[in-house]
Amino acid sequence: MKQEELIGQLPEKPFFDFDMPLPASPNLDYEMYNWDNYLELYYLFRWDWSKFVAKDFKRKSKLWQYTHYQLYNARFSTKRAACDWYFKTKSGEYAGIIHLYDLSLDNVADRHKRCTIGFATARKFRGKGMTAEAVYQLLRHCFEHFGMEMVLSYTKRDNKKANRFLEKLGFVNNDAAYLSEVYRYYEMPKNRFYNLI
């Protein structure tokens, strides 16, 4: 199906208010992921050796498919809505991307009060504190703008750096609740976040 045909079938607006900008933080600005800037993701990660960076970001054809799904399926979903933002230096250089997904209108088991986040940082910007700043800003946006009570983040078990990073940020490991042999699961309750900052 052509983009123009698909656009005609979408609701006028997403069910979640993604139009509210992600506010700037002390060292970073944020830019919503869209068709005008999607190739920046490829430029950030095309030569990245890390096996933990999504392969979709390293090939243009895969990135097009990822973008199509994000902007036409996930952005308008009622049960697994998603939105991505780049984080950028104050000089305007793209440094990485943060992901918000699994937003739901379903209130069964308080599903509408929790979501999931992810992140990927370009190699030259790793270890500089930017990812932590971007993730904290996204957490704040989840709690204050989207009314979440719990934010989940998960990473592969052998991604030791990401595991340590989430623990350092104050996420609490809760693998027992998810029973996965592939991933480790971390939770950030709203009250814990505000006690940490």
Image (cartoon, helix red, strand yellow):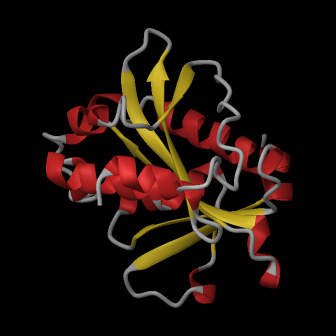
Q: Is residue 76 above or below residue 91?
A: below
- Quarter of the figure with the C terminus: top right
- Place of residue 150 in the rendered image (x, y in percent of width and height, measured from the top left): 75, 64
* Quadrant that contains the N terminus: bottom left
Instruction: Please state the total of marks drawn on the protein image.
Output: 0
Q: Is residue 23 above or below residue 185?
A: above
Q: Is residue 161 left or right of residue 18?
A: left
> In screen coordinates, is 46 left or right of 52?
left
Give above or below for 42 relative to 30: below
Residue occupying the point 44% across, 9% down: 91
Residue in view at x 77 percent, y 69 percent: 112
Q: Quadrant of residue 95?
A: top left
Name which quarter of the figure residue 104 lies in: bottom right
On the question of residue 59 being in view, the answer is no
The spot of residue 123 in percent (x, y) is 27, 36
Q: Nearer the viewer, residue 163 or 83?
A: 83
Residue located at (72% from left, 66% from top)? 114
At x 83%, y 54%, the residue is 147
Regarding residue 48, the answer to whether it shows in the image is yes
Residue 104 appears left or right of 29: right
Residue 5 image offset from top left, x and y in percent:
38, 53
Q: Above or below — where is 185 with respect to 58? A: below
